[in-house]
Image (spheres, grey):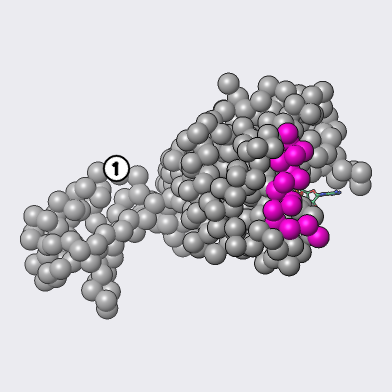
Amino acid sequence: MNAIETKNLTKVYSNNFTAVNSLNLEIPEKTIFGMLGPNGAGKTTTIKMLTCLIQPTSGKATVGGYDVQKNPDEVRNLLGMVPQQVSLYKDLTVMENSQLCADYYGVPQDERDSRIEDLMELVDIKYAKDKRVGQLSGGQKQKASLVASLVHRPEILFLDEPTIGLDPTTKRTLWDLIRELNDNGHTIILCSHDMYEVDMLCDNVGIINTGNLVAYDTPQGLKDSLLESNKKEMTEALSQISSENDVSTSTKEDIEKLSLRKMSFLLKNQNDEIIDSIRKSEDVKSIEVAHNGRINLRIDSFDDMAVQNVLNEIIASGGVIKSITTEEPSLEDVFIKATAEVNEDDRA
Ligand SMILES: Nc1ncnc2c1ncn2[C@@H]1O[C@H](COP(=O)(O)OP(=O)(O)O)[C@@H](O)[C@H]1O
Ligand SMILES: [Mg+2]
């Protein structure tokens, strides 16, 4: 079953601005979904409609099978929300805010405070439980907000840029918490600009641009299709070359950029013999030995066996590898491409 389904979901604000434009989206239950998109893409607006904070202008959305317009109370009971802007009462303490939330959702009284304290311990904010929210730092507010939104154990949790402003340790605590919730069957919708976070945590990723879904797949699937589309671009560029006599340098550079990727080694025992045998390898398109001893190569981007072949070559010639990195398409590359293409279409 899907935790979230939208059909032509649209939001036109009162100033006639269309922030979400006929969005169709399905998020399977018990998965972690990453929502990516540039500033102003319509992510927060989408989340606000799904959490019944604002009304859609047209289209439909269901959360846990309930229609957000027809059954907002049922929807609210299913979900927890950590908003982009912390929305706790500034004059109440962290504890009081959490209690208020718990009472609102009907958390049993005899469980309430112990649940709150457990969560506080989990995100490490217990030391500030009697402080007023208005006196907390940004990161502390974020933690307090997390406690308040989790106290009723929501089936579906929305996190709108939850790790912004968190220190690295707290960030990792939150990632662990997200994984743990998901292991326990909760569906998580995560809006983030942190590509590493999304790549590492999410089962599926949707990229939203100017109110539309422009890409949807697993993180690996998105990267694979970027590679595919680069391959297509390269083939097109190559056919252009064979049909034109005068090929510009920029076309040549483009082709090189698309067709070659970097691979870099640090060897324990570098010598001319090893370098020579790497140089002779068919898979190695260029080689450079850096000052720090790293050997930087360029290999064919689209050849699945290239890394393996180069490795074999090095080992066969007696090289002992200390470290190795290879360049691969990142989620950031996918993001830049997916959002740039639509901008170009818009301009056309
Ligand atoms: N209340 C509002 N009235 C008019 N326009 C709005 C309102 N809220 C947001 N917008 C506009 O809608 C677009 C999408 O905003 P938002 O959903 O916050 O984007 P995101 O969260 O992806 O950065 C932006 O251009 C923003 O300026
Ligand atoms: Mg936003």
> At label 1, which amino acid type do we have?
Asp
**Depth check, front residue: 72 or 43:** 72
- Residue at image position (58%, 38%) is 188
Q: Secondary structure at mark 1?
A: loop
Q: Please tell me whether residue 93 belongs to the stretch shown in magenta.
A: yes
Residue under the image location 59 percent in, 58 percent down: 126
Q: Quadrant of the N terminus?
A: top right
| Residue 246 visible in image | no
Q: Residues within 10 Å of mark 1 (few under 14, many from 20)?
A: few
* Residue that label 1 marks: 304
Q: What is the span of residues highlighted in magenta in the rendered image?
A: 91-106
* Image coordinates for residue 180, horizontal then vertical, percent: 48, 41
Q: Quadrant of residue 271?
A: bottom left
For image coordinates 27% across by 76% down, the residue present is: 292
The residue located at (83%, 39%) in the rendering is 54
User: Residue furthest toward the bottom?
Assistant: 291
- The foreground one among 225 and 106 is 106
Q: Is residue 304 magenta?
A: no
* Distance from mark 1 CB to nearest ligand 1 atom below 8 Å: no
Of 85 and 27, the residue lying toward us? 85
- On the image, the x and y values in percent for residue 164 come to 62, 59
Residue 278 vs residue 8: left or right?
left
Horizontally, is 65 left or right of 176 in the view? right
Q: Main secondary structure of the magenta part?
A: helix
Q: Position of residue 339 (x, y in %)?
A: 62, 48
